[in-house]
Amino acid sequence: MRPAEPPGLHPAPRRERKVVMRWIVLVACAALLPAACSKSSPSPQAPPAPAKPKLGIRPAGDETIKPDLSKVSDELKKVYAYIDGHIDDHVENLQKWVRQPSISNSGEGIPESAEMVKGFFEQLGCQESRVYDVGITEWGAPGNPVVYAKCDEGAPRTIAIYWQYDTMPITQPDAWSSPPFEARLVEQPPYKKVLIGRGATNSKGPELAYWNALMSIKAVTGKLPVNIVFVAEGDEGPRPGAVRHPRRKQAIGRQPGMAPHQDARVPRVPRRQHAAREGIY
């Protein structure tokens, strides 16, 4: 026997109750369906990115001869290991710089190169990094910018490092075995691989080599062992005007712990030999 309806309520027709119940069931199923589908069929994950191909650079430079690390500290061994592990990154850093023209005679790429050098010093953690307009040189023409930077590591000693970021123009493009601003890696006996490009040896290659080394020291030890003042000029090729310019001397000043300047003469490299060295690093 069916229970009586509560007083004050009129009994709903049986058919209407069935319709309401069906709608309730349908709404509940619709709400549960996405959750059930997501659990039963998880979305496919993207495949991992392929490993970056290696450049094939030998960190030691030779397959049979390696540096003797038995006489260096454990900390320095870690720095060397870091350099070996990041050798491709270091070469790619040089390639990016060689691909940036910096022709002092024509001014091609000079402003961009000065800013690029400023960025190198900022990456190193230098607290001050500035591009100076040297104005009119002693030859009566505007000089290319000088980049000044100071890295204060709180060390008792300070060293000054000179850079040149300019290069000579490309006067014989057909004489190049590879495009001068492509920084291509090629096989060239007796070496395994060489990087060919304008400024690869004079002087972007050597400068980026020890910049990479300084970056490696900071990555391993957290700081540099000395304070560093950088001065980079863009007029070394045609005329070393910035070297003697008063702005340069004013920028450097006398840094605490810096040894007095001493002039030193270096043997002059014949122009033909100099031009041959320019392309290979």
Image (cartoon, rainbow, N blue to C red):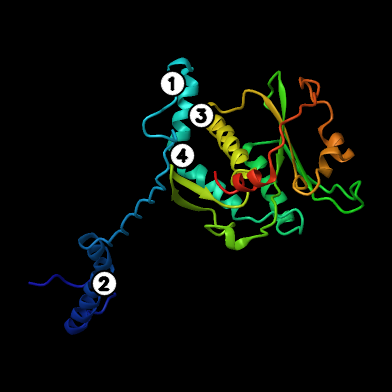
| Mark 4 surroundings within 10 Å by alpha-carbon count, few (fewer than 14), some (14 through 19), many (20 or more) | some
Q: Which of marks 1 and 4 is nearer the N terminus?
A: 1
Residue 241, image x and y in percent? 84, 44
Residue position for label 1: 68
Residue position for label 3: 220
| Mark 3 surroundings within 10 Å by alpha-carbon count, few (fewer than 14), some (14 through 19), many (20 or more) | some
Q: In this view, does 41 lie to the left or right of 269?
A: left
Q: Marks 2 and 1: in contact by CB < 8 Å?
A: no
Residue position for label 4: 86
Q: Which of marks 4 and 3 is in front?
A: 4
Q: Nearer the viewer, mark 1 or mark 4?
A: 1
Residue 184, image x and y in percent? 50, 54
Q: Is residue 110 left or right of residue 206?
A: right
Residue 277 vertical position relative to residue 216 in the rendered view, above or below: below
Residue 147 vertical position relative to residue 160 in the rendered view, above or below: below
SS type, badge 2: helix
Q: Marks 3 and 4: in contact by CB < 8 Å?
A: no
- Amino acid at pointer 1: Asp
Q: How far apart are marks 2 and 4 (CA)?
A: 55 Å
- Amino acid at pointer 3: Val
Residue position for label 2: 30
Residue 214 vertical position relative to residue 273 in the rendered view, above or below: above
- The quarter of the rendered structure image containing the N terminus is bottom left
Q: Which of marks 1 and 3 is nearer the N terminus?
A: 1
Q: Which of marks 4 and 3 is nearer the N terminus?
A: 4
Residue 47, image x and y in percent? 30, 58
- Amino acid at pointer 2: Ala
Give the camera-side residue of 29 and 258.
258
Q: Distance between the residues labelled 1 and 2?
A: 72 Å
Q: How far apart are marks 1 and 3 (CA)?
A: 20 Å
